Amino acid sequence: MDREALAYAVSEILLRHLPGAADPEAVASIAADLVRILESPALETAEGEGRRLVVVTVMGKNHSGIVHAFSEILAQHNVDIADINQTIVHGNFAMMMVVDPASASCGFAELKEALKKRGEQIGVQVYCQYEDIMRAVNRI
């Protein structure tokens, strides 16, 4: 997809999700900024050009076995955990994992679906997104 087509696609997504009174010029400006960020060399990871890491965030009421449930799914799909951090605050569990799907036995969509399904099974919410996209969105 070329730059212009990507900008139009991002604009259409923004307009679909923003309130009806969204300023079209502001949306076009945001879309252009997002495209510039996505094309930026700063989005390449320090460990290798073109390598895309995935951030998995898990949140819910704490109970035993949450970390195991997700590490099991990742192991089944041959996905490496690059970094992990978890905390419990007043009985609420939060975990963020940065995973490397380079040698995964499935695509991103299939991995995301497997993780979300496991989350439903054990009663927690799961969010998966590419690290570069998460960083770009959080810059705005």
Image: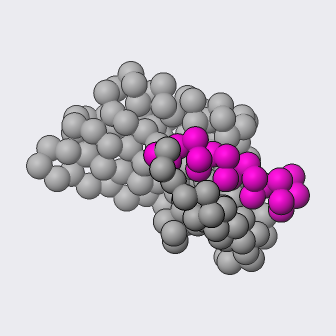
Q: Say how many tags the image has.
A: 0
Left or right: 97 as drawn, with respect to 79: left
- Residue 47 visible to the viewer: no
Give the x, y percent position of residue 51: 73, 62
Give the x, y percent position of residue 40: 73, 74
Q: Is residue 47 above or below residue 64?
A: below
Give the x, y percent position of residue 90: 11, 49
Quarter of the image for residue 31 reads bottom right
Colour convention of the picture: one colour
Q: Is residue 108 above or below residue 118?
A: below
Q: Viewer-proximal residue, 99 or 116? A: 116
Residue sitting at 55 percent across and 29 percent down? 114
Give the x, y percent position of residue 128: 53, 45
60 within the magenta span: no
Quarter of the image for residue 82 reads bottom right
State which region is magenta.
1-19
Residue sitting at 75 percent across and 53 percent down? 8
Q: Viewer-proximal residue, 102 or 34? A: 34
- Residue 23 visible to the viewer: yes
